[in-house]
Each structure stands twice: as C-alpha cells, then as structure tokens.
Amino acid sequence: MAGLSMLWSARSIAVVGASGRAGSLGRLPVEYLLRYGYSGQILPINPTATEICGLRAYPSLAAAGPVDLALIMVGADKAVAAVAECAAHGVPVAILGASGFAEAGAPELQEQLLAARGGTRILGPNCIGAATLATGLVASFSPWFAGAATTLRADTNPLAGSEVVPGRAIVQGRHTNIRSRTAVALVSQSGALGFGAASLAVDRGLPLGWVVTTGNEADVTALEVLTELAAEPDCVGLLGYVESLRDGSALRRLASRGKPVALLVAGRSAAGRRAAASHTGALAGDDRVVDAALRQLGITRVADLDDLLDAGEAFAASARRTRSRPRSGRSRVADYAEPRSAGVVDTEEPPRVGPVRVAVVTTSGGSGILAADAVEAAGLVLAELAGDTREALAEIVPVFGSTENPIDVTASVMRDRTLVERCLSAVDRDPGVDAVVLCFCVLTGDDVTGIVDALRQVTKPVVVARTGAEHLAPAATAMLRALGVASFPTPARAVRALAATLRQAASTTIDADTAPEADGGTEPITDEWRLKEALRAAGVPVPRGRFLDSPADFDFERAVLKAVAPGLVHKTEAGGVILNVTKENVAEAFRKIATIGRVWAEEQVGGGVEVLVGISPSPLGRVLTIGAGGTLAELLDDVAIRLLPADPATMLEELKIARLLDGYRGKPALDTSALLDVVAGLVALTARWPADIAVELNPVLVRERGAVVLDAAAVREV
Amino acid sequence: MAGLSMLWSARSIAVVGASGRAGSLGRLPVEYLLRYGYSGQILPINPTATEICGLRAYPSLAAAGPVDLALIMVGADKAVAAVAECAAHGVPVAILGASGFAEAGAPELQEQLLAARGGTRILGPNCIGAATLATGLVASFSPWFAGAATTLRADTNPLAGSEVVPGRAIVQGRHTNIRSRTAVALVSQSGALGFGAASLAVDRGLPLGWVVTTGNEADVTALEVLTELAAEPDCVGLLGYVESLRDGSALRRLASRGKPVALLVAGRSAAGRRAAASHTGALAGDDRVVDAALRQLGITRVADLDDLLDAGEAFAASARRTRSRPRSGRSRVADYAEPRSAGVVDTEEPPRVGPVRVAVVTTSGGSGILAADAVEAAGLVLAELAGDTREALAEIVPVFGSTENPIDVTASVMRDRTLVERCLSAVDRDPGVDAVVLCFCVLTGDDVTGIVDALRQVTKPVVVARTGAEHLAPAATAMLRALGVASFPTPARAVRALAATLRQAASTTIDADTAPEADGGTEPITDEWRLKEALRAAGVPVPRGRFLDSPADFDFERAVLKAVAPGLVHKTEAGGVILNVTKENVAEAFRKIATIGRVWAEEQVGGGVEVLVGISPSPLGRVLTIGAGGTLAELLDDVAIRLLPADPATMLEELKIARLLDGYRGKPALDTSALLDVVAGLVALTARWPADIAVELNPVLVRERGAVVLDAAAVREV
C-alpha cells in the first residue's frame, strides 16, 4: 500500500498521452506541473513528439526511465494498453482520468484494467487526479488549475514556510493564511466536486495540503487514500466525500489512525441512494447503519460541503493548539462518541461519562440562543456553571447581560479588554465546562487583538462564531487561526465544527485489529427449534418445548403448537401455528399441525414488553439491532443500531420503549438486565457464524423477572 | 401603523442625546447619516451644544421643528422622559437603543415607556436601530457603519440606479451587484445579530434594502415591521430573525401580503428556548406548533443565518424573473405548502396535487447525488422524465453520463454551448418537471456566457449550484443574478433556496381576514358527560350513557361506570372508573362509585384503533392535533399539528398510525371518514368557545364502521 504515497511524494511523473496542442486535455497536466513549480521530473510520453511545452518528450515509459507516478491521459479505448505498460515498467501508481468504464455500462473494460495492472495501483478511472498544493505536484487536469487567478502561492500555502509565532500572522487581505507545515487533506470520489470543494477551501484560506479524487474506484478507494494520508505527519485532519461506504475494515483502519476525520456520505435519501447506485454501480448500504458506524468510530458525518470544510478548519486549528499545548482538554472529551465503550485513553484520569458540556460566551443574546440550539442539535449540552464562576461573571457582566449559560457578556464588555479576559478565564477554570464557544457579531479590527490575547489563556477547546463582514476585521481570521482557534460566520457552524473535533477525541480507543469479522467456522442453525435449543445452551431463556408424537404427550398448561418441516419458513401463513392449546383442545390442534409437519409444542408465555434483538450483515460489518418488537416493530420503527462489537446498554437508552422497560405509567420496571443477557448470548452464539446470516429474535418478552425468546429465525441474506 | 414606515421614509431625523465628543455613542448616528449621504434633515438634540459635526444642534425637539423619526441615544434612566418628549412633539416613531429594561429585570421601567409613548411608536428598547441602504438613512449606532471599508455605495446599492438589461450586468469584482430598484428586507429581534447578518449579506452581494432591529419589542414587533415592509413596492422578499413567535394574527397578516418570507426562529431546542426565554422574558411556544404554523402559512423556516441569506438571494432572483416574465411557473407549484387546502390561485388550471417535481441537471455526478438528497430533505421530489425528454437527452448526453434524473450531462457537454441549451430546453418542455436545479463544479469564466444564454430560455423556476472558487468565474454570480437566477456554492443550499421560493407560491391563498379566533361567545363545557352530550348533539358518536340512581337502572350488556362530582378531574386515580360492569357485578361497582359521586354508566365499546383528537390554545392561535391515542399516545409521540382552520385529511397522511387505519397486516381498513366527521364535529362545537380551552378526545375508537369518542375532557389552560 506504501506505493499510494507516490500520489503526493512522486519525484518523477510521466504524463502518458501528453500533447503540445493548445487546448488539448493532454497538455493541461504538463502546463500545470510547470506553472505550479513541481520540482521533480516531468516526463511527457507521446509516440511522435520529441518536445512538449519545452520539455523533452519520450515515445514510451521505457524510454523515459524510472517513473514514480503515471498520469494516463488517453481515452478508454487505449487505457488498458497504457496500464499494461505501467505494470511492465514497474510504475507504482497510475492515475486514469478517462471515462467510459463501469459508470458507462462497461464493467468488463474496467475488469480488463484490473487484469492488466499487475503491481501498479490504479487511481480511477473516471477521476480528475490528485494534487499536493505545497509542492506543485498537480497530477490533474481540473480546470481549477487553469484559472488566471488560481494560485497555490507560498504565502497562502499551508505546507511551505515555517511555523509562525501565534498572534503574529502575516496578514494580507482575506485570502492570507498563516504559514504552517500542517494541513488537512481532501479525498473525493467525485472528481469535479472534489476540485470544486478544494478551490472553495483555498479561497477561504483553509490550510489544505492534498486533494485526491478516486472516481470509479476500480482499485484504489477513497478510504484507502485517506488512511494512507493519515500516516503523513503533517496531515492533521481528513475530509472525504464518498458515494458508497461498503468496507467496514477500511473504515476501522482509517479511524484507528487517530487523526480526525469528517465524511460527507452522499446518498442519505432514497432518491440520493438511487442516484448514487446508478452513478457508481454499487448499492449503498442502509443509511442508518452508516450513521451508526461513523458515530461508533468517532468519525464526524457532515450534511453538506460547507460543513465538510468547516470541519477541516476546526481540525487544523485544533492540531495547532494541541501542538502548542501538550496537555489539551482532550481527556475531558474522550468519552464523547460512545461513553461506555471507551477503553484506553491517554490520561490518568478516568473519562467522565456523559456528553460534552459547552459554555457559550456571547456579546449578542441572539447568537447565544442560536448557539444553544446548535449545542443541543450536535448532541452536546450547555454546561451548568459553578457558583464561583457565576459570581466571577456577575462582577463583569452588566445587569442587562446574563451570567447564566449562554453567558451574554453584552457588547459593552468589548470596550474593556481585561473584562473579556476575565470572563473567559472564569469559564475556563470551571470544572463543569469542557469546551467554549465564543460568539461575536460585527467584530471590528480594534477588538481583535484583545480577543486574541484573551483566547491565548484559554486551555480548553474553543471555537469562535463571528457574524459579520470579513472587511470589518480583516486580520481576525488569520490571527485566530494562528492561535489555533477556528472561526465561523454563524454560531451553528462553529458549534458543529467544535463537535467534529471533540468526536474524534473519542476515537483514540479504536484498534483496527480488534475489528470482529465472523469467520464462518461454525455452521449456522436456521431451524427455529434448533436455534432455540442452541440459545438455551448459550444461557438464553426460551420457553420449554418438546415434540409431540401424539396428543397424549402434551404436558403443558397452555402451549403454542408449531409445525416443523423442511423448508417451512412462513409457519403462520401456512396455518402451522396454533395458540392457546390446552389439554381440552390439544387433540384437534395436533391433528391440524400434523398435516403440515412434525408437531412442536412450546409453553405459552404472556405479559411483559416485546423487544426485537437482531444480528444482520451489512457492507460495513455485522450489525446489532435492538428495538420495539412484536406487532409494534414495524409501526414504531424504534431501533438502536450498532456495528459489533457494541455496548447494548447504551443502545437501550436510545429507544422509545426504554420508557416501557423502565416502568410505564406506574407499572413496575422490567428486567432489562435479563434482556442484556439475551443480547450477549445471541452475540456469543453467532460470533463464529458466516457473515451473511441474519438472526432475529422477535419478540423477546421482557418481564418483571427475566426475559424469554418467544420466536427466533435465522436466514442467509443475499 | 403607517407611521412605522418612517423608519425608512423619514425626511427628518432627530438624534436625541447627540454628542460631538469623539468616540461617544451619541456621535455615531450623526456621523453615519452624514457619511452615507442621507438627504433629509439631520437634527442633533443636545441641551447644551449648538453645533455637532458641523450641524446645528437644538436644545429640544420642540426647538427643532417637525420630526419624522427620533433616534433616542440617552441611557435607560432618561429614556422615559425622552419618549414623553417625542409623544408631546408628535413624533411618529422613536428608536430606543438603551439597555436596562425588561431584559435586565426591570419590566416596570419598560411599562413606563409604554405609558409615556402616547401616539409615538417605539422601536426597542435594547435594539440597534434601523437602516435603509439606498438612501443612507442610517438610524443606528452599529459598528458596521463605522468600518473603514464599509460602503453602501451606489454601484453595489440595490435601490439606487435603474434596471439593467439581464445579461448585461456591470461586473466589478465579487462585491459588484446588479443595479436594481428591488431588494429584500431583513428584520431582526437581535440588534447585533441583525447588523452582523446584514454586513454578511452586503458582503456577498445580496440586494439588501432594509435592516430593522426590534430588541425588546416593548411596542413594535418584528412581525409588524416585516408586514409594513411587505407593503413597500420595491421590497421583494422578507427575512426575519425572531426569538419568540407569539402572535398568530400578526403572522397571518404578514403571510397574507403575498411576499415571500423566510424566518429564522431561535429557540428550536429546549436549551435554546430556555435561553430565549431568559433573554426576551417571554416563553416561546411549542416549537412544533411554530413549525406547523409556518408551513401552513407558506413561510419558510430556515435553520441558520446562511440559509436565511440564501433564501433572500432566491427571493430577489425569483422576483426579477417574475417581473421579466409575467407568466412564471407559479401555478404549477401553488399547491406546495398545503395541497388540499389551497383555494384560489391566479391561474385557470386547477392546481396539481402533490409535491413539486424537480429536475436536476448536473455536470458532476457527485453534485447530482447531493442535489437528490437535498430534494428529498426539502420535501420536494425528483421528477420522472417523460420518454420524449429522455430521448432528446440521449442525443446529447455521452454514454458515461446519465439521462435519468439527476441528469448527468457530464463536463464534456460544457464544451458545446448548444448542447447545454438543448438539455435545458428538453427538461423545460417536460410537463412532469416543475422546477430545475442546475449544478456545476469549477465553472470557469469561459463557460458562463453560454450558460446564461441557455438559462435565458428556461421558463420554469431554476436555481444554480456552482461549487468552485468565485475567482474562476468572477462574473458568473452577477450575470446569473441579472437574469433572475440565484446561485449557491453547494447543491443542498441551492435546493433549499429553491424550496423557499416555491413555498411562498402557495401563500397566495392566505387571507388574513379569515383567520379564525375563538370569540368566547359560548360558555365551554368541561364535564365529561355534558361534553359527550354536546358532542352527540353536534353529530359526534359517543357511547350510550345514563345516570344510575340505583343498580336496578342498569340496562347495558357491558358498561363502564364513572363517578361524576364537581371538581373531580382525575377520575381513574380516584378510583372513580370501573370497567367491565355487567348485570352480575353492577351492585358492587355501583356501591364503590357512589361513594365518590353520581354514577354515570356508559356502554363499553371495544375493538378498533385508538386515536387522539384535540384542540388546544397556543400563542399563534388554536391548534388542532390528531395522533396516536390511548396508551400509545405518549409513547409513540405520533401527532400531526395544524393551526385552525386546517384540513384533517392531510393530517392523517402524516401519521404512523395511518398504516393501522388503512388496514395493518391484512386487517380490514378502518372508517377514517367517520374519524374525520368526529374532528369536524369537535371543531364546530368549540368554534365559539374561549381561546384558552383545551379539549381532548382520547381515545376516539376508530372501527371498521364508524368511530366513537370513548373519553373527552376539557380544561382551561393557563
């Protein structure tokens, strides 16, 4: 996989199909590499030309000598031969821009590419290549690089130059950026969208270091590139646009790298999923499983491109602060994503259980309310301030402000810089505060220095919402960025970006090697009665049952009779289930069931609340589902979903029926502990079953004492 | 109310408490009015100065002569006297910036303001004033106007100059705007946030004409100002930030003006609502009622400030298109907000029932998928293309694109302008398409003219998503804007903005005069049995019931016995309800109930599905609720909510239990028609009851034939 890093560290690039003709696609990459000052070898490959854009051209890769990276600019018809040439020449990575493969209904041509690739990794086809902004390694034909005003110039270049002392940023209008070696990376399955977003990122001054587009992903996937980029020491955050998430192991590997990740996963809606399927040829997985998986792995899922770039700002800022302060507030938020399943964190203190507690400090009441709304929407909570803190604030905040969180210090506080500093200091000291959101409206140039000075003292994670035109304080963004504080035009965007950085803090517990994969070592059991016997053997309560050879064998007070026959799946529809069988009516019931199959009798159990417990396959790994069961299952659509391994106790807390389990309307609480034992038993029983088996226990009857599995089914999903 | 327009049409402005001292707040408005070229009279009022900023100062309003608008810059302690002076002098409107009133725990001081105001309307206190950008009428002390680079200059000024021919916009960098007399207005309860957002709006080139902030709203409310601005002929759209929506009549009046409105209502979350309540002193209403009311009235509710300004862009563009094309696609989308209750629309064709059908045309597959996701999230649907359309597209779109919606024309189509035009033309002709979203990534300058030409032919509502740096096509935004096409950096933002303009198209049916208000003419009935008798009289089925004087009066097969006693509300908890009473056990049941009150016996009815029907008061007017009833009510939280008048049939479609009513798991369909009769009966019965009475029928048992009200309660809500 190391070869993939040639996408950003190649010292020689061959442009296969390079052309000298003005306006031709084959000329663009050569022009771009020259224009943006790529310092490695540029090797135009053209069967007839001897010179292209002033560079010596070669008739073949063999003639050009060693090649780290090949950018293949020929059409689909000649692509297979070009890839074969790369393979023969030992080129580690080839980028294939041509369209006309799987996305055009020609999967066989894509298969031929793979067959020809040998040891060469292929990026694409149907992608727009990759670019490393610091070094001018533009292996791409995106029109972005042709723009007259486009610049990857050093003074805006996040990878060039050296660290500046925070607060001493070089300011040069709104595009000006601080100098820093660290940057975030953007990887996009869509080529056009990827470079479009990259151009917006550079436009807003986001320290963007790498852009890679993966197109059809015949070979190399976006997750793989993101994981490889995560290994780059200067890469401090990863942004991805993906249209299908189908590889749970790759996702775990990415999360295990310990770098913050935000993903925009397209196809959230049914309409979008259909569009994505027709675009990529691959059906996207259940969106709720995607949601659950990303939350578990500490990866932020964003709703739009703006949010993706916002997360990048926050990642870059957070890394800068962390580097300048070895002990950040990390330990306090290590439990954000999945409190109870958090394992090892890099602190001696045990992680606090519960959501991150945010203090909002604002000069505008309105911004404070919008921030409070956003805090709740992001799954954070408003911190309850300590008495000390409120007393300290009461000395500073005027009577028409508020010393309650959100803390409305009012614009009048801005007139005295020491007051801003005292406010932030009081909040920062409060042990009940995990992170701070600072909101301003119409911040002007005069105010900026004081705020930067005040923020320098804050030790906890902090973001700024600054609602006002850039030109009112043109230095503010750069100065805050230099300090490691990201700023955003609205409170909600600031809060979401903060949440993205805190979410990652939990992912330190992820270990790719522990990712469980069913190994298929054990044959699955699909007969209901055998499945129940196996559950009983695994310690999971099931009703007492037996086969009846005649009605005389019946020894139940009240029982259910079920037909057992090979291939009989839909028992009820076939008339193969009879309820309320007693000694009085067993003869008649036995006669009916016996016409269908063997007669299985089972103690009839009532009362309690019906719960569904299931394990099912998904592209991202095996999924545990717990939810409302029985006849309510479909109607309520009340389920909690996790990739395995998972902590079922946290899942119960998400359910509406948790209220039934806890004792509803004065009824006694039910035995959730027994329910959790059922879940654990099912997980253990099926741990070594093949990955494509779905098992559903529905209903599991949860009672005041104990829980019992009334029905169980297992099917092989296709 | 006409006096309010002095906020933007005043020909003389008095600045009470004006000061010549550099850096003083009282100097700012005088400076601003001078700097931005206000052409009316500026009248500084100061007890001692004779000249301020080169203008003659006056010791009192009386000395200054006629005053259209007074901006009071004195502190809270002197505010009451200043307001009284305005009242005495007959000033129509006074703006009060001072803090220290209701928001500072001094409601009594705010009451004194009102007592002193006489015929003068008060904006504020605790606001930052108002500004009309075209005329330099800056009656505000916002630091925005002090910015060195701040300009309301004519060439970016939406109200100055004359209309340009579409496509011939004067382009002057990214801030340059087209010249037009029409603009949108922004009204904000929060002063700082309002001017912060306004500065962002001007920064992005949004044609913003008016900014008004309302602060504590002691007298004038944001809704009132929005309604007044809607009457301005040049105002083509209204944007509002509000922290409490408590006046349903004012909301209806605003909606009835026929101008598009987008509101950012803060306090969506519980945390935000608490913050808003402590900020404004008024408890915000149930957020779901706010949602329902805005949807009914055709007002777009946005989630953040970005979306608010995006809606403004779309409103401005849509108005421009509508003016240049008398017959827009309006009739096609007139049924968007509330299909069945739509009444009069300005077209001969009957409105089509169903959501707006959107065609997405994209040069990037990724943008298409994101647009499809956004279409579904916004409550629109992807159009199903006609065969003709797909055939026409197949001639243009390359094989690696898609002729299905989202239509991926691929970047290659951009190389031939006639192809873009043919694509859009085919989609525009399709009768199954109501609106078009056009998505580009990395649009460059060369492409813009062709796209503008192609868009000129499109007759249906259209928005553009352009994901790429501004500098790649610096003229694009202005040229599209001149054509009446709004453009946005992401597909999702484009789709949401489109939805905002279409939502308004439905509001033509709103008539403020038909707004129903309970008039209290009839005394409400709160006894259960009397309420049921009244329902029966109104044609609503209730179980047969009677009072029993002795067990011998019992003439039911199976009945419920209920105690009736003055003040007895919680019958069940008091042991005042006994089920399953028959001739066999009636004596015992009678004895028990008789110890509590009079004995009411009622036929016991079973079967069917339990539904809740309720009418309740809200700050916005009386609310009709239909939802899951009985024991499931609280658990499912499955309700549809509308302000009255409402169409109950559309409400049923929103419910999860609609599936139970339609016949669940093979069961027969239930009598929803009878349920609708129950709703109509309840609405009729309570039409003239006082507005603060809540009535709940729960459960209403809906059966295969008929529906019957099993329990009914009415309480006066406080």
Image: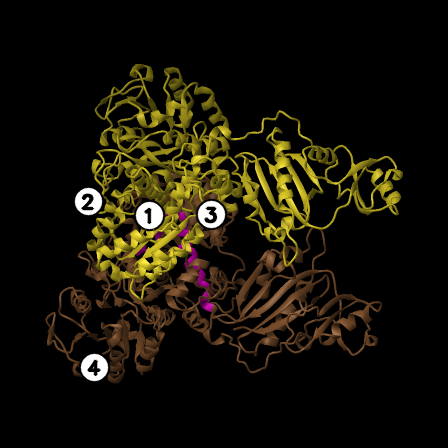
Chain colours: A brown, B yellow
Single out the mark in the foreground, 2 or 4.
Answer: 2
Residue A570 drawn at (x, y percent): 64, 70
Q: Main secondary structure of the magenta part?
A: helix
Q: Earlier in the sequence, mark 1 or mark 2?
A: 2
Q: Which residue is mark 3?
A: B354
State the residue position of label 2: B171
Mark 1 neighbour density, 10 Å: few (under 14) some (14–19) many (20 or more): many
Secondary structure beneath dot 3 equals loop
Front residue of this view, candidates B94 and B479: B479
* Nearest to viewer (mark 3 / mark 2): 3
Residue at 23% x, 67% y: name it. A138
Q: CA distance from mark 2 to mark 4?
A: 49 Å
Res A374 visible = yes
Secondary structure category for the residue under label 2? loop
Q: CA distance from mark 4 to mark 1?
A: 52 Å
Frontmost of labels 3 and 1 is 3
Q: Are marks 2 and 4 in contact (CB under 8 Å)?
A: no
| Dot label at residue B462 | 1
The disc at residue A66 is 4
